[in-house]
Image: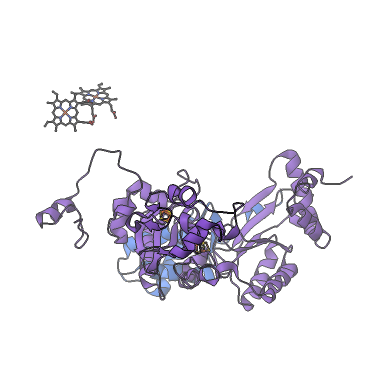
Chain colours: A purple, B blue
Amino acid sequence: MSKTPLLDQLESGPWPSFVTDLKRMAAKKPQVKDLLAQLERSYQEKITHWKHGGIVGVLGYGSGIIGRYSDLAETFPGVEHFHTMRINQPSGWFYTTKALRGLCDIWDKHGSGLLNMHGATGDIIFLGTRTENLEPCFAELTANGWDLGGSGSTFRSPSCCLGPARCEWACYDTMEACYVLTQEMQFDMHRPSYPYKYKLKFSGCPNDCVAAVARADLSIIGVWKDDIRIDQAAVKAYAGGELKPRGGATPYAKLDIKADVTDLCPTHCMSYDGKKLAIDNRNCNHCMHCINLMPQALRPGTETGATLLLGSHAPILEGAQLSWVIQPFIVMESPYDEFKELNVRITEWWAEHGKNRERIGELILRLGMREFLEAAELPPAPQQVRIPRANPFFFWQQSDFDAEAKGRKYYTREGFDVE
Amino acid sequence: MALSKAELVEHIYKMVEAASGKRQLKASDLWKAVLKEHSELDKKDVQTAIKELIDGGRCVYTYFGGSYVELPRVEAAAKKG
Ligand code: HEM
Ligand code: HEM
Ligand code: SF4
Ligand code: SF4
């Protein structure tokens, strides 16, 4: 009889199973045999047998290694230490076969051979090694051009969609921006000096393939400022069924332009009279719905950049939040100085005022968007309004009276006045 | 009184040492405390001094929910049991 009946059930579904992978690796690596046995035991007892390590790492770095120990080391000596290493991924997760083989060889030599491609931060995850293997493994990684990524209270490894490498909708070079910021922030990535984690994610368009709006403290989402480009002949071809909706990626043979496209536009800014498609671009909120359905007829405009949103995180001190707009449009072009400087103002304000384990989004909830915008030197803009106000009170500040005395209206900073 | 680079490193080491076993200090606790007494310094100076302590192995970064700067010690979780 199998020693792992509960885990075996996980192999019975239609999908690839991590249990099958573990069994294959167990033939080669004794620690993986112990891993399977300890996991089966956890399934029986319904408790974890992992303990957190708080101290292991490589010399000089305060991040990139996540300590794990078994509390059943006597029974399962192979998993007595089972630390995780995070390795910073390349932008867009492009590898040569040679690079992948190199990574696997290093991990076969220094660890369990188990990988997770990729973790939630986008890093390459090496699962399971002993403390004494960390330095040699790190040395071999760096000799081959790799480095550890972020963990703990640091700037986490940024990640991005593959953007212009393969996608016609990219509104800026996500991979370059991600790479440049990764290099720029090396100190803060390896040496924890923030109140808690801080993540950047770069998506090339509002489809947001890396889910930046939900998973990054600072979400950089590509957008266009001008009009959606329309090819009326292609619209006709969609209407006539010569072109398939969504590039053929739906079961439907033919698009009903009114029912499927214009009626579902969230701001009702489109119309179709059976011949011509019209868009009131001032009211388009760049949701990508129409473009996704008719990629050959509609394309994003040509005046492109990104919208910056801030504050998303999983439930920690407060419940989960999505990022919300702090800057409606920014040009994203090398060397990204405007973006880098803003990023520093954001993290400085947070480092100064944030409590331990308080994410930037939670700090804004606590101190208010007004304080944040002033510190980040961002002008207030209608796009920053997340929900209509429900609080009838307005608290005037001295700076408002000063502004009024100078003949300006309501706002505090020179040049920031609301017209 | 202005601190030299070497004195700043020692000053920070003493803070970490004094807190050891009582309170876990974060990098930001250290720079806030130092800047309060020494307004002539800036955050970068303190971060560089912490880096020196870490690179020399006199202090280590630890992680217990958040990240701290502490004296090296034996990992409790590594012990059997
Ligand atoms: C310049 C004089 C006054 C000012 C500035 C003032 C201001 C206010 C404010 C800000 C509220 C709260 C409104 C809300 O939350 O919806 C309020 C409610 C109220 N005020 Fe006045 N008030 C004044 C005079 C008075 C006087 C003279 C009385 C009674 C003799 C009074 C009785 C009340 C009552 C009973 C409420 C509650 C109403 C409710 O909740 O439906 N107020 N007042
Ligand atoms: C033991 C005595 C009192 C108790 C237990 C009490 C309790 C309360 C409570 C629970 C509220 C609602 C707060 C809220 O909705 O957030 C309130 C509001 C209010 N109370 Fe009292 N109250 C007392 C005495 C008084 C007195 C003596 C006055 C007037 C002379 C007064 C005037 C008001 C007013 C005007 C409001 C409305 C405030 C607003 O809507 O902004 N209360 N009170
Ligand atoms: S987020 Fe947009 S640009 Fe990036 S891959 Fe997805 S659809 Fe393309
Ligand atoms: S992108 Fe969205 S909001 Fe804009 S026109 Fe298309 S469907 Fe409407």
Residue A370 picture location, percent across and down: 29, 52
Residue A400 picture location, percent across and down: 17, 52
Q: Quarter of the image holding residue A84?
A: bottom right
The residue drawn where x is 29% and y is 61% is: A377
Q: Quadrant of ligand 2?
A: top left
Image quadrant where one finds the C terminus of chain A: bottom left
Residue B54 picture location, percent across and down: 52, 68
Q: Quarter of the image holding residue B41?
A: bottom left
Q: Is residue A308 visible?
A: yes
In this rendering, the answer to whether A307 lies above or below A90 is above
Image quadrant where one finds the N terminus of chain A: top right
Of the pair A224 and A199, the residue shown nearer to us: A224
Of the pair A328 and B28, the residue shown nearer to us: A328
Of the pair A33 and A268, the residue shown nearer to us: A268
The residue drawn where x is 60% and y is 73% is: A146
The residue drawn where x is 74% and y is 42% is: A43
* Extreme residue in the right direction: A1
Q: Quarter of the image holding residue A77?
A: bottom right
